[in-house]
Amino acid sequence: MVVKPDAVPAGVKYDAITFNDVFEHLPNLSVIVTAVRHHLNENGILIINLPVSDGIFFKIARCLARLRADGPMSRMWQKGLPSPHLSYFSRRTVPQLLLRHGFELVHAHDLPSVSINGLYDRIRYDKNLGPLKAAVILLAASALVPLMTFMPSDSRYFVFRKTS
């Protein structure tokens, strides 16, 4: 049985389906990937970009959580926000999941971990952070941007092709 997403008319097929920073928010990904496969034409393309657990910020947050400083890890999971992350993947586990559902990895590449443009507003989206703390986080992130090219990225995109 294939579950039909409400936004997709029954029987409609696409050449490409894209998930831009949504995949990690979805429940029951096995059902979702099965539905995506059903709605892709033969050799259709699935593109997913999402945060990955191999990145420097996730690694720092994990280390801090081990020291009982849970705030950064809670933020990585977006706990307390309207749409928290329900899953986190690594560079290795995304292809493993899709391979099990009849997809092959065509291409993958890192995306920048931090974009300064609009960052203050994204930080302030968490209403638990006051303007001063948000400004400190913005300054720290801005200082790290030049170093980010030498560190593992926290965001990646994957391009998959539906196999026969």
Image (spheres, rainbow, N blue to C red):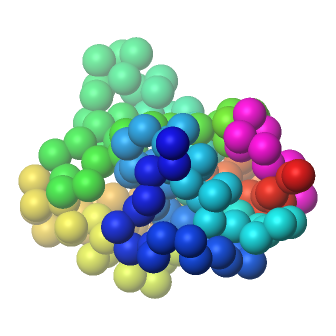
Percent across and percent down for residue 3 are 45, 51
Q: Is residue 99 magenta?
A: yes
Residue positioned 23% across, 42% down in the render = 79
Residue positioned 79% across, 49% down in the render = 103
Percent across and percent down for residue 145 are 59, 66
Q: Is residue 110 visible?
A: no
Establish if 26 lies above or below 125: above
Residue positioned 29% across, 18% down in the render = 68
Left or right of 163? Residue 131 is left
Asked which quadrant contains residue 16, the reply is bottom right
Establish if 94 lies above or below 63: below
Establish if 11 lies above or below 95: below
Left or right of 64? Residue 35 is right
- Mark count: 0
Q: Is residue 104 visible?
A: yes
Q: Is residue 61 magenta?
A: no
Residue positioned 71% across, 49% down in the render = 151
Q: Which residues are magenta?
A: 98-109
Left or right of 11? Residue 150 is right
Percent across and percent down for residue 86 are 37, 40
Asked which quadrant contains residue 132, the reply is bottom left
Percent across and percent down for residue 27 are 38, 42
Q: Nearer the viewer, residue 135 or 31?
A: 31
Q: Nearer the viewer, residue 3 or 56?
A: 3
Q: Residue furthest bottom?
A: 117
Q: Nearer the viewer, residue 58 or 79?
A: 79
Establish if 142 lies above or below 108: below
